[in-house]
Every structure is written in structure tokens, then in C-alpha cells.
Amino acid sequence: MSKIAELNETVELKIGENSYSLPVIVGTENERGIDISKLRGSSKYITLDPGFKNTGSTRSAITFLNGEDGVLRHRGYSIDDLTDKASFLEVAYLVIHGELPSAAQLESLEQRVKEATTLDTSMETLLNAFPTTSHPMGILAATIGSLHGYHPESLDPYSDESVKEQTMIQLLAKLPMLAAWIYRRGAGKGYIAANPDLGYIENFLYMMYAEEGQPYEVDHAVANALNKLLILHVDHEQNCSASTVRIVGSSHANLFGSISAGINALWGPLHGGANQKVIEMLESIQQDGGDTEKWLNKAKDKSDPFRLMGFGHRVYKNFDPRARIIKKSADEVLEKLNIDDPALPIAKQLEEAALNDEYFAARKLYPNVDFYSGIIYRALGIPTDMFTVMFAIGRLPGWMAQWKEMRDNGDPIGRPRQVYTGYTARPFVEKENR
Ligand code: ACO
């Protein structure tokens, strides 16, 4: 679907004596962008925007975010409706293909994913070869990158649609399986195969927690909470990891390599890695006597590198709608599982204090998706260093949708420019004269 309005609106830019007419692009939700793609050719000037705070990198029809009003929709459907009414694989199909699947399309997707939920025995050797101190995100990125070797047809950037489709199925199937095996490796448990009688979420829980040869009962409250949590993470337009996936893929790198790069981008504590850091922060506050005011002051102190983890967002300058849903879900999950986690009251106290604080109000800093998600993951028995891996399972469909859109649109290779600030030409200095 391409609904870019053909406007006659232009913006005039004056540089010295010269004037340049720049076209205005309008999206379907009426946001406006100035198209500067030909500016350097005509004027020799580039634009400078470190961190891309005001720069659109592409036109996209996948996700709409309105940071001022706290709106999030995928392909036009609200995040509230999707988390309430859909399954994770349904939403995956939606973001990748643009429409909700029919019953037959969903059944076919579920079946194909089930059939692909296997790993070659050599993967066990590979997993066992990582040092015990390896972080699960590093192992996930490396093992996902290695999958191309089992599917060499995916290396051809001009492979036909069925190969791209099959590669996406392989990733949907194998990423959660690898996540479960990475967890088992860390927990010193043997690897177990998927159970074909179970659905996507249930199978993931089975591969994580079942004991070989013993019956395993999936807790439906846990499966439902996880389904919701994964949907909440599905896509978030041109964030750090999605932009990474697109830019790596723009060189015509294969999908496994592009997703592996996205996993590494997600790992950082300013992005998906924040969910691990939030729980570590809440634990530190608890061990420190629970004085939230003291930690808020630390976050406000410009000479202290500490930031309130799980707070703030590049786009949301209002409540992150995902945080609102997750907070409610955290209450429900803890009650259903009868868990009394001391981190939850600390998180709520911290949130309330921050929302009433001038520093946070003036900068429009609200809780983001990562603020409460760790509390749910912990209630589900997932260790802290696996939290960002859980985020990656949820974000995979979005990364693939972004990669597919970039390829289908024929986007050019991503290659920003710079304003050079180094030395001008100078003579080489011989070693003995340095
Ligand atoms: N704690 C304290 N101060 C903060 C915080 C925070 N969490 N976040 C932003 N600020 C302050 C900054 O110091 C800056 O203050 P100043 O104007 O006085 O210099 C102002 O708010 C604006 O912040 P920027 O860093 O310029 O905002 P930016 O859009 O570049 O960064 C980010 C957004 C990275 C999310 C930031 O808010 C942050 O570091 N948050 C904590 C980490 C986190 O939770 N990340 C997860 C984000 S959601 C996701 O990626 C899945």
C-alpha cells in the first residue's frame, strides 16, 4: 500500500544568494517531511543530524507511532486490539504481509513453523563451544548468523519470493528454539526437541522448562501473558535495531546476517538491553534500603552517568502505550501466579515519584516498554540475562517486515554522509621524527 499524497507544497531554502525548492512529502497520518535527497547535488550542502533525531530514513507502511499522543498501530490496528484479540503468529503475519491472515493462512503458517522447529545436532556442539561467561544475546546473534550455513540458498540476494518466505519461517521457528536452548545451556540442562502437539508459545515454554521424558503441563496464565508480551514488542518503526537490520540488508546481505546484526543492536542498554538493567536497578534500590528519592536524584545529577533505566524514549513524549499495558499485565500475572515480588512496589513508587518530579516532567520522560517487562519475565521464571533475548523473540517479525519492505521498495544502500572535522592535508612524518 502506498498512499503518499502528491502535494504541490514545497519548502524554499535560501543559502546565500541561491534559493532551493524542496518537495514536501505527506504520510497517511498527515506527518510532513522535507525531501532533501537532491539537495547536495544542487547546492553542495548536506544536512547534519547526529542520532537521526529529526531525520526520516524511509517511507514505511508497517507501524504508526504518534509520540505526542502515545499512539501505536501496526498496519492500522491498535496495539490494544492486537494484544487483546490476536496470537503472536497472527500479528507476525500481519506486520510482514500487511493484512491479518485468514484462518487457512494462519493454520498454514503455524504448521510450517512447527515443521521448521528443529535444529541440527551440530548446533549443540556450537552452543557448547561458547565460554561459560558468554551473554545469551551474544550467543543468539552468533548462532542466528550461523543459520545461513544450513540454508545456503538464502545467501542469494536475488533469490525468489519462496526462498525469502522460507527463510522467514526458519527464523520464526528457530529463534525461540535457540533462545530456549541457550537458557538450558546456562542452566546446565540437556537440550530437548520441540513438541509438535503444542502451539508456538506453549512449545517455547516446553523447550525452556520441560524435563526430558517427564510430563510438562503448560500454565495457560503464563502462556497468555507471554503471548501479550511478545505482541507488545513486535515492531516499533525505525528504532535502532530495525534501522540496523534495514541498513545491513540494504547492502544485499542475507536475512540471517541482517537479523543477527539487529540482535546485536538490541543488546545495548539504551535499547532492548534496558529491560535487564531495569531489574538490576530495582534490585540495587531494594538492597540500598528502597530510598527511591535518592536514586531519582542520582538520575537527575548531570555529573553522575546513572540514568533511570526504563524511562525516556526518543519518540514518545507521553506515556508509552506498551508500558501502560505491561504494567496492568504485571499486576495480573503476579496475582495469578501468587508471586510477591518486592521489585513491583519499588517500580511503582519510582514511577510515581518521577512522574511528579519537575526534571522528568520538563523533559517529558515517561516509563517505556522495558520498565515493567522484567518483572513479568521474572515471574515467568526467566533469568535476568535472558530478558533481552525475550525481547528479540518478540521483535523478530518487525525486523523481518522492515527488511522485506526495504527490499520490496528497492531502497538504495544506506550510507550517511559526514562533515569532516579532522586534519587537512599534511606531510607524512618519518618514524624517527615522531
Ligand atoms: N534518566 C535521566 N535523565 C534522562 C533519561 C533517563 N532515563 N532519559 C533522558 N534523560 C534526559 C537527558 O539527560 C536529557 O537531559 P538534558 O536535556 O538536560 O540534557 C534529556 O532527558 C533528553 O534525553 P536524550 O538522551 O537527549 O534523549 P534521547 O532521545 O537521545 O534518548 C533514550 C532516549 C536513549 C531512551 C534515553 O531516554 C535513555 O537513555 N533512557 C534510559 C534507557 C532506556 O530505558 N532505554 C530503553 C528505551 S525503549 C527501547 O529502546 C526498547
Image (cartoon, rainbow, N blue to C red):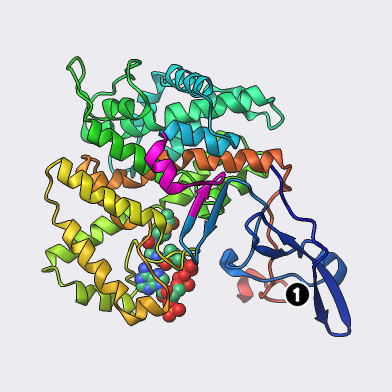
The residue closer to the viewer here, 247 or 162, is 162
Residue 189, horizontal then vertical, whole percent:
22, 27
**Label 1 neighbourhood size at 10 Å, few (<14), some (14-19), many (20+)?**
few
Tell me if residue 85 is in the magenta stretch.
yes
- What residue is at 30 percent from the left and 27 percent from the top? 202
* One can see residue 138 in this view: no
Indicate left or right for 27 with 66 as reference.
Answer: right
Q: Which corner quadrant of the image does residue 274 belong to?
A: bottom left
Task: Depth check: give the residue in front, 139 or 39.
Answer: 39
Which quadrant would the C terminus be assigned to in this image? Answer: bottom right
The segment highlighted magenta reads 72-86
Q: Where is the N terminus found, in terms of image quarters?
A: top right
* Circle 1: residue type: Ala
Question: What residue is pinned by disc 1?
Answer: 425
Q: Quadrant of the rendered structure where residue 433 is?
A: bottom right
Q: Residue at x 31, y 58 (%)?
A: 371
**Residue 426, image x, y percentages:** 73, 76
Which residue shows up at 24% across the image and 62% down it? 281
In the rendered view, does 191 fall on the left or right side of 257? left
- Is residue 126 positioned above or below 404 on the image? above
Quadrant field for ligand 1: bottom left
Q: Which of 237/151 is in front?
A: 237
**Can residue 396 be seen by looking at this rendering?**
yes
SS of the residue at dot 1?
Answer: loop
Against 11, residue 313 (above or below) is above
Query: Is 4 drawn above or below residue 125 in the view shown?
Result: below
Residue 26 colored in magenta in the image: no
Q: Quadrant of residue 23?
A: bottom right
Residue 232, percent from left and from top? 40, 46
